[in-house]
Image: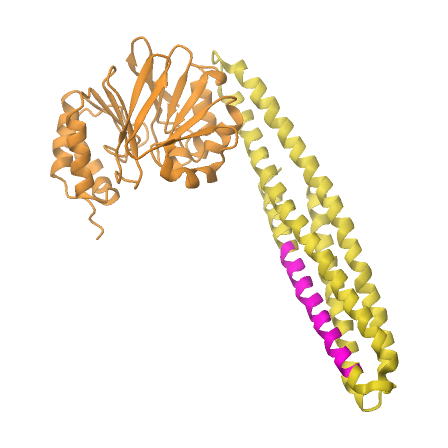
Chain colours: A yellow, B orange
């Protein structure tokens, strides 16, 4: 792996962690919006009857997203460890190959063979594990897209229900807007994570 | 990498250094190897940049499975940042280093190599029938610091004590002590923090029978130059930055 590729791999993994941290914050905002919406719907009583079950959906979505992102965060930490391991193993393998070139006619040159083969094998194992982990992470990120899409549908329904809530119209519309914006942010952050991971695969 | 044999008996002391291919901005270092019948100790194996030429040079004298011991006088990167690479190359090796520095040194990578912690009062490293004394040299310059003394070969590997910043390709032994002094002065005044620790180290070393004083940078001292160095160092005020 070339130096720039190593750098881009470290940067990509770090940027994924940052994006996921943002997704987590937004999911928490949705959760707050759900609690707020529930309070408004309760106050609105009959006028917001249709809105009440929606607040439960919003809350569920926020919870699902937080759980998914928590899990993905753990995977992202593991991906970082794998990146470090792969970097170390690649460096070791390259250095041992360099030793081989520099030994000339050293009496004990052949004693290096096993270490060199093992280092090469460990490098390949690390690379395989890393790639398999990237694939898993891409799948998990795709799974975060589902609640984000569902949140947008719920936001659209919320707007309709809000329109029948009389003086609570503005408050409930604000909730719908908030959910919609959050869903958009999650969608775009997750998309950036997936792009970053795809770049890692591409640079391989 | 240039090799100089500094002791030949039932076992050998080898000095490696003056690597012509060393990157310019990296300080030149001396590595020492004690080769016995079936074992090999690499003393202050060096920085990560030096790993390949150093191992390639040692392979002229020992197979990897007989490179059984590494020693780090302290935790600096020019001493031991190559550890993670030795860790991948040596199938059965131990690292002897200060117990105090274990948490720091492990940052360089130490998964298969066994870390043998040296307590503050020093100890002994045994290679076949050869016993090497691990002499405390704390605060000279690192807060936990050790030298290696071989009473049979009368060699003291003194770490940074006696070090000098030299031009590439400088001779391996001091040939004119008075001229050499200026290459050492600032290094010792600035890098050695404590006159008390210096006094303690000098008293300890004066009790040893030393024929070669072998620092980690610059030239080695031989014969009367060892005493000249101790006298000069005795009179030098160190810790000048405060």
Residue B1 in picture, x, y percent from top left? 39, 23
Which image quadrant: the C terminus of chain A?
top right
Residue A35 colored in magenta in the image: yes
Residue B121 in picture, x, y percent from top left? 28, 32
Residue extent of the magenta highlight: A17-41
Apparent side of residue B148 relative to residue A139 in the rendered image (left or right): left
* Point 40% across, 18% down: residue: B40
Q: Against A53, is A94 above or below? A: above
Apparent side of residue B160 relative to residue A25 in the rendered image (left or right): left
* Point 41% across, 34% down: residue: B80
Which image quadrant: the N terminus of chain A?
top right
Residue A5: quarter of image = top right
Residue B217 colored in magenta in the image: no
**In terms of depth relative to the viewer, which is nearer, A17 or A5?**
A17
Q: Against B200, is A97 above or below? A: above
Residue A199 in picture, x, y percent from top left? 70, 48
**In terms of depth relative to the viewer, which is nearer, B108 or B93?**
B93
* Point 20% across, 34% down: residue: B201
Q: Against A12, is A59 above or below? A: below
Does residue A160 show up?
no
**In terms of depth relative to the viewer, which is nearer, A129 or B165?**
A129
Does residue A57 show up?
yes
Apparent side of residue A37 relative to residue A75 in the rendered image (left or right): right
Q: Against A70, is B194 above or below? A: above
Give the residue at the far bottom of this rendering.
A167
* Point 37% across, 29% down: residue: B44
Judged by its main secondary structure, the magenta piece is helix
Residue A16 in picture, x, y percent from top left? 66, 54
């Amino acid at each position: 792996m070339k130096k720039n590729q190593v750098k881009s791999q470290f940067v990509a993994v770090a940027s994924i962690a940052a994006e996921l941290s943002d997704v987590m914050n937004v999911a928490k905002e949705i959760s707050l919006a759900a609690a707020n919406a529930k309070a408004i719907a309760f106050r609105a009583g009959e006028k917001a009857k249709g809105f009440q079950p929606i607040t439960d959906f919003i809350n569920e979505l926020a919870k699902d997203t937080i759980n998914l992102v928590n899990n993905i965060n753990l995977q992202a930490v593991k991906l970082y460890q794998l990146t470090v391991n792969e970097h170390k193993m690649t460096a070791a393998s390259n250095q041992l190959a360099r030793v081989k070139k520099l030994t000339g006619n050293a009496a004990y040159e052949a004693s290096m063979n096993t270490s060199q083969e093992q280092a090469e094998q460990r490098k390949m194992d690390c690379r395989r594990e890393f790639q398999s982990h990237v694939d898993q992470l891409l799948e998990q990120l795709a799974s975060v897209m589902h609640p984000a899409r569902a949140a947008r549908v719920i936001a659209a329904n919320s707007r309709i229900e809000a329109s029948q809530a009389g003086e609570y119209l503005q408050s409930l519309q604000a909730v719908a807007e908030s959910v919609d914006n959050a869903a958009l942010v999650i969608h775009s952050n997750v998309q950036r994570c997936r792009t970053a991971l795809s770049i890692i695969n591409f640079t391989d | 990498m240039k090799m100089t044999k500094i002791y030949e008996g039932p076992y050998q002391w080898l000095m490696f250094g003056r690597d012509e291919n060393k990157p310019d901005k990296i300080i030149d270092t001396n590595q020492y190897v004690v080769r016995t019948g079936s074992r090999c100790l690499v003393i202050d194996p060096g920085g990560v940049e030096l790993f390949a030429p150093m191992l390639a040079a040692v392979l002229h004298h020992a197979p990897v499975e007989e490179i059984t011991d590494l020693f780090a006088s302290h935790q600096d990167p020019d001493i031991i940042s190559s550890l993670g690479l030795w860790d991948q190359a040596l199938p059965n090796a131990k690292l002897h280093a200060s117990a105090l520095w274990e948490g720091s040194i492990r940052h360089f990578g130490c998964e298969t190599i066994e870390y043998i912690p040296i307590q503050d009062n020093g100890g002994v490293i045994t290679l076949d029938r050869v016993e090497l004394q691990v002499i405390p040299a704390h605060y000279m310059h690192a807060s936990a610091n050790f030298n290696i003394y071989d009473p049979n070969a009368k060699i003291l590997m003194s770490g940074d004590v006696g070090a000098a910043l030299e031009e590439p390709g400088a001779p391996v032994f001091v040939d004119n002590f008075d001229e050499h002094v200026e290459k050492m002065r600032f290094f010792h005044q600035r890098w050695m923090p404590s006159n008390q620790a210096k006094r303690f180290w000098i008293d300890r070393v004066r009790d040893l029978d030393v024929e070669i004083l072998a620092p980690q940078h610059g030239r080695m001292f031989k014969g009367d130059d060892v005493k000249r160095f101790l006298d000069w160092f005795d009179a030098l005020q160190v810790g000048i930055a405060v």
